[in-house]
Amino acid sequence: MKKMSLKTILVLSILFFLPVIFLLFLYPSTHNYNPLDVVNENVSELQFFNSNSVEDIQLKDHITIIGFLGRQPVDHVIAASNLKELVYDKFKGFKKFQIVIVLPKGAEDSAIQLQKEINNYDDMRFWHYVFGEPNDIKNVFNSLKTEEALDSTLFTDHIFIVDKDSAQRGRIDDREDKEKERDDAIYPLYSYDCIEVAEVKNKMSDDLRILFTEYRQKRKGEFDSSSRRDEDIKETN
């Protein structure tokens, strides 16, 4: 039998051990996994709203992206398109995921126009419009933690993540690494500007992946967020 050369043995050894080393590097990052911060509890339910869906639209037991597009939602097609292409199309396959656009009554026709603008014959079963009175819309919006405001048409280009327990998710500390190194003051991220493509594509997509990972771990019985949730709420108050 012909003996293998030292070079061949070395190459085979590298090919064998390299994946093992890679997995060992991955293990600590999995072990040190941190869930997406709870920044606010008890987001108001959508109990006083009508919808364009045959099913009852609610926040409870869903991972929801909620947005407010005002009396003429078709005027905000760029914001809606970014939301669809960068978030909805990417996450619509996840169980219990939905996007809910909150609109005032009377905006039904404009919502239909908007839907035609952003939908290229895709599956839009998990994209919903709900319609309510201005006061009810303001109540839902005011139950969210935010530094933004609705304009006179009940519009904002900021969107929010709400988890299955009707708690708002975001970042208590949104500083970049360089800002942390400089020990800059901590600032939060309560919502995501859907006009800013980079913010939605990078920050929001990453945060949603973290949230889905959390729920996957919960299903496996590997996650307990109760103590962390209490700490998160205290830090934001």
Image: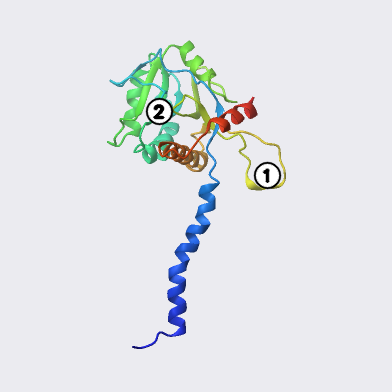
User: Please, which residue is most extreme toward the bottom here?
Assistant: 2
Q: Secondary structure at mark 2?
A: loop
Residue 1 is labelled as none
The residue at which mark 2 appears reads as 62
Which class describes the residues within 10 Å of circle 1: few (<14), some (14-19), or many (20+)? Answer: few
The residue closer to the viewer here, 139 or 60, is 60
Please tell me which residue is depicted at 36% across the width and 88% down the height of the picture. 2
The residue at which mark 1 appears reads as 180
**Quick one: label 2 or label 1, which is nearer the N terminus?**
2
Kind of residue at badge 1: Lys
**Residue 122, image x, y percentages:** 29, 36
User: What is the distance, in whole Å, between disc 2 and disc 1 at their CAs?
Assistant: 33 Å
The residue closer to the viewer here, 224 or 67, is 224
- The vertical placement of 133 against 220, above or below, is above
Quadrant in the picture for the N terminus: bottom left
**Residue 235, image x, y percentages:** 64, 29
Kind of residue at badge 2: His
Which class describes the residues within 10 Å of circle 2: few (<14), some (14-19), or many (20+)? Answer: some
Q: Quadrant of residue 219?
A: top left
Res 72 seen here? no
Please tell me which residue is depicted at 35% across the width and 35% down the height of the picture. 95
The residue closer to the viewer here, 209 or 153, is 209
Circle 2 or circle 1, nearest the eye: 2
**Residue 79, image x, y percentages:** 45, 32
Quadrant in the picture for the C terminus: top right
Q: Secondary structure at mark 1?
A: helix
Res 117 seen here? yes
